[in-house]
Amino acid sequence: LLRLAAAEYILLLTLHHSIADGWSVGVLSREVAAAYAAVRAGHLPDHTPLPVQYADYARWQRQWLAGPAGARLRRYWQRQLDQAPMILDLPTDRPRPATLSYSGKRHPFSFSQDLTAAVERLSQQTGVTVFMTLLAAFATVLSRASRQDDLLIGAPSANRAHTETERLIGFFANTLALRVQLAGDPRFRELLQRVRATCLGAYAHQDLPFEHLVELLRPPRDLRYTALIQTLFVLQNAPLPPFELPGIEAEMLEADTQAAKFDLTLSMLETSGVLSGTLEYNRDLFDETTIVRLLANFEEVLSRASADPDIRLSTIYARIPSPKLQIVVAASFTADPIADALAFWMEEFNIPLRLDFAAYGQVFQQLLDPTSSFGANVDGINVVLLRLEDWAQHCDSAREFGARLRQNSADFCDAVRSFAAAQPCLIGLCPPSDAVAADPDRLRHVIEAQQALTQALAALDSVHMLDLTGIAAEYAIAQVNDAQTDALGHIPYTDAGFAALGTAIARTIVGLASLRPDVIVLDCDHTLWQGIVGEDEPEQVRVTPPYAALQELMLRQARRGARLCLCSNNREADVIAAFRSHPDQPLRLSHLTSWRINWESTADNLRALANELRVPLDRLLYISQSPVACAEARALLPQVMTLQLPANPDDIPAFLRHVWILQPADVSPRPAVSADRIAVPADVALSG
């Protein structure tokens, strides 16, 4: 009891969570108030023994869980969480500590009365509770941020189904692992029904303690994460009763413990017709600006879903800015002029970009200092650009030049190995100057150093070597080097040279930025083969070399994890017969996951495949030679990446080489753009 003044006090109660839950605080408050009133009136407090004590409940629970009821609960949760992701991989503002940090902070927020009323209306119209609506919206925001369409969110339940427990102080509350699945680009109304089914199932099986669930599922233990769930959602639908003492004006004070048990805990309640709450977060992981942005996205989802319950998640996602991809560049020369090219291509691929350049010449510092921009770039991509001769300037002889290169190259490899970060690191070997290229001895040392670097770093999974020395020929650039700007400011390349470097780096980043489609949907006629099975006999369609090249590329995509499907306006029997009539073609029926071969619209078939395979539409790539089918897909399903093949089959192989998302991330680029230009060539496919 803290005395602040003659008539002002603070009563602070600290109870371990193992003996009291949120419900218990209400019970305790009522008992303290009743005892105080009795003593003030000169009576002894009423301490009539309760018919059941917490120990009785604990003994009953152990026996109950050991019997058939416990077995039923375990079967349900095993089935419900089968193959569920055990980690919600949210992007963080700082590297996650090696062990859990509980340093927390809370950010309060409040909805307007209009938005609160809209959320309640939406809940009534769709037959769900406000809790379910808020949970669905929160899951949508988390899905957009994490790029996961299957996630677990924790939610507490009072777990006091028996009337005998309502007056007990004890720890009855349980944490439910609610699995929210957002795959297939559902309408928000459909997502609400999924969440409703999940919640009702969880409530019907809420008696299995969370600790038992963790023991049952045995998720991989990682000291950086809480087990099974890392995010909690709470809606207080039964606020604590007012703390009233006779003769005293009393109010409940919120105690901020500056701690966070989970990465994120969203707590909400409704008072006076307004939904409000706090978002508690681990401040070792997140900045407050990130939390403010997340809450703004939360309101955006609820506003759009309330206005149109049939809105698809992909449309909502388009209104929520995706997390920016941070690229940090360190170079042995002044590399800032590549910024325009990188920004151009990231915009073309709809990748929000945050681009930083390390201080001039600080390649080794970035790799060796854990507090550097490289070290802090947890979820981004680091880029190192090397013109190796920069490490051996002012050497009088070729021998000294070679010795300096060998020593610095060895030191660089050691620095890269010591950095050993999980995030990708692109190392680009850039063109030598005209002076070095004209000196056979020095050029030989540069080539040997490049080969040694590539060989020494080949075993590092996070390192991606880019040979950029041939960009002049690859991009048809007349002049890549600029001796004058090199001498003035160590800016070694022309504008076209830097544009080519930026394009080559962007191409690799696109391959690393999770843009590769999960499902590739192929048309048949003039796509997989030459001819039309409805007009020609199935055995008469021809798999000529260009179409065989496309099929081989599709098989490579399948080997890296993509699922292949067919979508064609045809008779199913004719298409199957065409496959069986050409057993020597690369692609077989056994390589296909599913198909929609009918006379329905292309858009309807693509949407049906997405729903069947439970993937969002923006993870589909549709390939067809038909201008009509491609135009329909682009108009009705802009989220789907649509790729229209050239009309001339002989152009297909070259065309496919320029589809960035279908190329390996580690290959040297082979684009075809004219000198001094970075505009998208007509045959380069971007997104739909």
Image: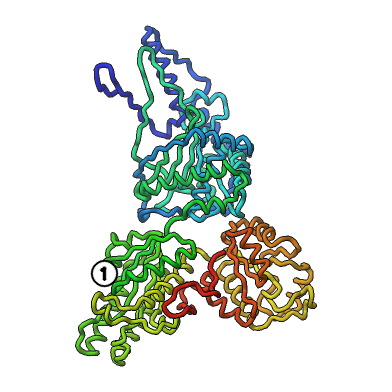
Please say if 472 is above or below 422.
Answer: below
Question: Where, quadrant-wise, is the N terminus in this rendering?
Answer: top left
Q: Is residue 515 above or below residue 232?
A: below
* Quadrant of residue 466 within the rendered picture: bottom left
Side (left or right) of 628 relative to 518: right
Residue 612 or residue 44, whichever sits in front:
612
Q: Position of residue 683 (x, y in %)?
A: 55, 75
Most extreme residue toward the bottom is 440
Q: Looking at the rendering, in which quadrant would you find the C terminus?
A: bottom right
- The one nearer the camera, 3 or 219, is 3
Q: What residue do we see at 28% from left, 89% from top?
A: 442
In the displayed structure, would residue 224 be above or below residue 595? Answer: above
Q: Label 1: which residue? A: 360
Q: Is residue 87 visible?
A: no
Residue at 38% across, 13% down: 246
In this figure, what is the number of numbered marks? 1
Q: Residue at x 50, y 19 (%)?
A: 50
Q: Amino acid at mark 1?
A: Tyr
431 relative to 272 in the view: left or right: left
Q: Nearer the viewer, residue 678 or 317?
A: 678
The x, y position of residue 231, in whole percent, is 46, 45
Residue 654 rendering spot, x and y as whole percentages: 56, 80
Establish if 246 lies above or below 81. above
- Locate residue 184 relative to residue 22 in the image: left or right: right
Question: Element under label 1?
Answer: loop
Quarter of the view holding residue 471: bottom left
Q: Left of 643 or right of it: where is 525?
A: right
Does the rendering let one see residue 59? yes
Q: Nearer the viewer, residue 526 or 217?
A: 526
